[in-house]
Image (cartoon, grey):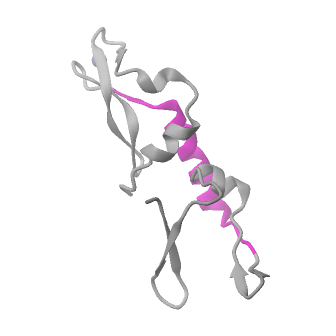
């Protein structure tokens, strides 16, 4: 799960929360920007230097909730044809969670005859 989400998240960020290198911690200390573990994910956040309390980046927290919802949904799509090719469409909610746009390249990683993984990113 270390497929760096940074490139994608940067694009959808509108708040300048992303430029906060430090935030005040409730203990009175300062928490500095860093990778935080949350569930099975490594996401952006801030870690207090004094009490070690971790603060999760709100955008990443929201994104994880959406991803968790998708995992439960088992989204299904029908294969269509365009010309000679078979086409699998990505539903909007998947495109959003993975921050995918037209023109991006994905890589097929065959696992066996029943599973074909899709790798995202450069
Ligand atoms: Zn603290």
Residue under the image location 34 percent in, 38 percent down: 36
Report the residue that reaches farthest toward the bottom.
Answer: 113
Tally of marks: 0
Ligand 1 falls in which quarter?
top left
Q: Which residues are magenta?
A: 54-77
Residue under the image location 54 percent in, 65 percent down: 105
Q: Nearer the viewer, residue 114 or 53?
A: 114
x and y percent of residue 40 in the render? 40, 52
**In the figure, 54 relative to 116: above or below?**
above
Q: Nearer the viewer, residue 75 or 103?
A: 103
**Within the magenta stretch, is there residue 67?**
yes
Residue under the image location 34 percent in, 22 percent down: 21
x and y percent of residue 33 in the render? 33, 28
Q: Quadrant of the C terminus?
A: bottom left
x and y percent of residue 91 in the render? 72, 61
Q: Is residue 75 left or right of residue 110?
A: right
Q: Is residue 11 left or right of residue 21?
A: right
**In the figure, 26 relative to 72: above or below?**
above
Report the residue that reaches farthest toward the top.
Answer: 28
Residue under the image location 58 percent in, 50 percent down: 99
Report the residue that reaches farthest toward the left.
Answer: 50
Q: Nearer the viewer, residue 107 or 65?
A: 107
Q: Quadrant of the N terminus?
A: bottom left
**Image quadrant assignment for residue 18:** top left
Q: Is residue 85 left or right of residue 43?
A: right
x and y percent of residue 61 in the render? 51, 38
**Within the magenta stretch, is there residue 45?**
no
User: What is the chief secondary structure element of the magenta stretch?
Assistant: helix
**Image quadrant assignment for residue 90:** bottom right
């Amino acid at each position: 799960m270390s497929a760096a989400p940074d490139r994608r998240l940067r694009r959808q960020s509108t708040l300048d929360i992303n430029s906060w290198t430090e935030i005040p911690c409730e203990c009175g200390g300062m928490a500095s920007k860093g990778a935080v573990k949350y569930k099975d994910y490594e996401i952006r956040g801030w870690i207090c230097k004094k009490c070690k309390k971790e603060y999760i980046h709100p955008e990443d927290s929201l994104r994880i909730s959406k991803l968790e919802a998708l995992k439960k949904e088992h989204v299904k799509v029908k294969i269509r044809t365009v010309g000679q090719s078979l086409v699998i469409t990505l539903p909007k909610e998947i495109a959003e969670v993975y921050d995918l746009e037209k023109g991006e390249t994905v890589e097929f990683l065959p696992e066996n005859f029943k599973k074909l993984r899709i790798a995202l990113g450069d």
